[in-house]
Amino acid sequence: MKKRIGRLLPQAREEGLITSELPDEVLVLDTGQNKAHCLNDFASSVWKRCDGKTTVKEMTLLLGRDFQKGITEEAVWLALDRLGKANLLTERLPLPGELSRLSRREAVRKFGLAAGLAMVASIVVPTEAMAASCNITTSCKHVCFASNPPFPQIGRICKSPGNCSQISTTGSTNCATWVSGQPHIGQCVPK
Amino acid sequence: MSTPGLPVGTPETHGGLLASTLAGSWRRHPSAVDIPVERLKGIEPLLLHSGTAGLCWGRLRKSPLKSSSSAHPFHQTYRLQTLHAEIYDRQIEEAFRILRASGIDPILGKGWAVARHYPERGLRPSGDIDLYVHPEQHAMATAALQGSSAPWDRVDLHSGISHLRDRAFGDVYDRSQLVHLGNTEVRVFGPEDHLKLLCIHTLGHGAWRPLWFCDISVALESRSPDFDWEYFLSGAPRRSDWAACAIGLAHHLLGADIDGTPLVNRTRQLPRWLVPTALRQWEEIKTPHGRRTPMAAYLKSPTGILQALLLRWPNGIEATVRVGGPFNEMPRLPFQVGECVARSARFIATLPKLLK
């Protein structure tokens, strides 16, 4: 098992992802799952090395050279675990040996991973901000419309799909002429 | 350009605090925001709801509040806006490709056309794709977009340029420019026309969004030395005066730099009610125009009609522009009543069709 894991070749997912590089982090939008993630410098470096050809051991050496400090294999494995959980790899990899039995906090303490601690955080934005910046591929999929009063405001985000009598996948923030009760509730009637 | 003065919005009110938080936020190197955490919390819904959370982050990240939990929603908004911009750009490219394949060359306004002047894309939300076509091409453009497989709800296709109605479409088109966007070139308004459009659009919507004043400020401050002020102020004098007042508001509220413009005198003589009206409007988390349930919906279910009518009561700025009035020291009530009467008349005229 150990040997087999050592030969695994992590591969980053590409399809359906939109990325944007900022000075100290990489942002990733999974258009299929409608989720956004923020990768810190270390996590994004690991992710970029996931070319389907490089083993974890090789990756560790390369990353150590990139960061000019000692990067442990455990740190890379934990990064891969995080990336896998966020569905940013083509396949989620099992953590090897002792790592699989430790919590993240324990692993950090035990292996002293301060030099290379991967952070893959979800980007969750308050609903008000989304109402101000509604986007077809993300938040508008959750725009809520009801066919009975009180009418939710167009562009308002549902707290949960259960609150909706209809969920529009083609909502617009500019449906000035939408009329409740029309056949396509929530769809924009051309001006 | 010299350093602009501080905005006059007093931080004692939420509107004033919003103004001081956003002052200069569109610049490449804005100063750190200086605001106590509890006061930031107080205006957080206003910032988030008005689309200025990303701009707020641009200043917050330079302050000691950067790592606080209070700054988190602003940082997250900035990040998501950065990603949305990537999608937005592709959609604009695609819209241009489709329309050009039908022989239509639209002009892009607002949205990306102004976002490109900001130092980072995450600062400003990506909104609609506002495309302006000649009225004679509008039907063909609509058909071209509807005939494509992509959803085009996001495209706001304008027939002509209502905000620049004192200018001929052809003249505006002749002054428009091609700029790079990804792998293509998109047509945007000439800087003078665009600034004027931004100004009149902002006032026509009652100065509801502080973001629009940031847009005016960034468009103003990123103008080139050959910006043609004579052309900017040409056309119907009243409309030019509105534009000058909008720039004056951006200066007073957010500290937009008006040095080197011919608007300094007008800016000093804004009607006394103008700045307080805008600040009051900013304090209301009010449904923007595009998101109001149409009055026709209340014909079948009158519940909430009173609230709907209240939502439609225009502020002095909106009323003045909608009835074509002047920005002077006269009381605004007659304009507000006049605007309501005119709108009601238009609604009544459509009733027979709606009741069918």
Image (tube, rainbow, N blue to C red):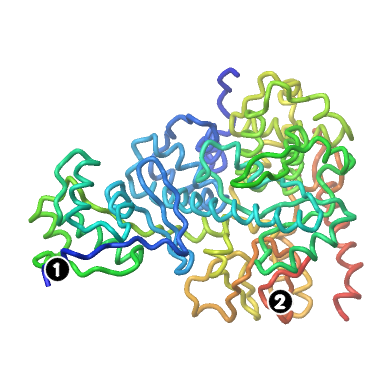
- Viewed as shown, does residue B146 lie left or right of B137? left
Q: How many numbered marks are there?
A: 2
Using the image, tell me which numbered label, if any, was put on residue A100. Answer: 1
Q: Where is residue A129 drawn, in percent x and y?
A: 52, 55
Up the image or down, B147 lies above or below B35; here it is below
Using the image, tell me which numbered label, if any, was put on residue A180. Answer: 2
Question: Between residues A110 and B30, which one lies in front from this camera angle?
Answer: A110
> Which circle, 2 or 1, is nearer the viewer?
1
Up the image or down, B157 lies above or below B235; here it is below
Q: Secondary structure at mark 2?
A: loop
Q: Secondary structure at mark 1?
A: helix
* Residue B220 visible in the displayed image: yes
Q: Name which residue lies at 47% across and 64% down.
A: A16
| Residue A172: quadrant of the picture | bottom right
| Residue A104: quadrant of the picture | bottom left
* Residue A191 visible in the displayed image: no
Q: Name which residue lies at 69% across and 56% down.
A: B95
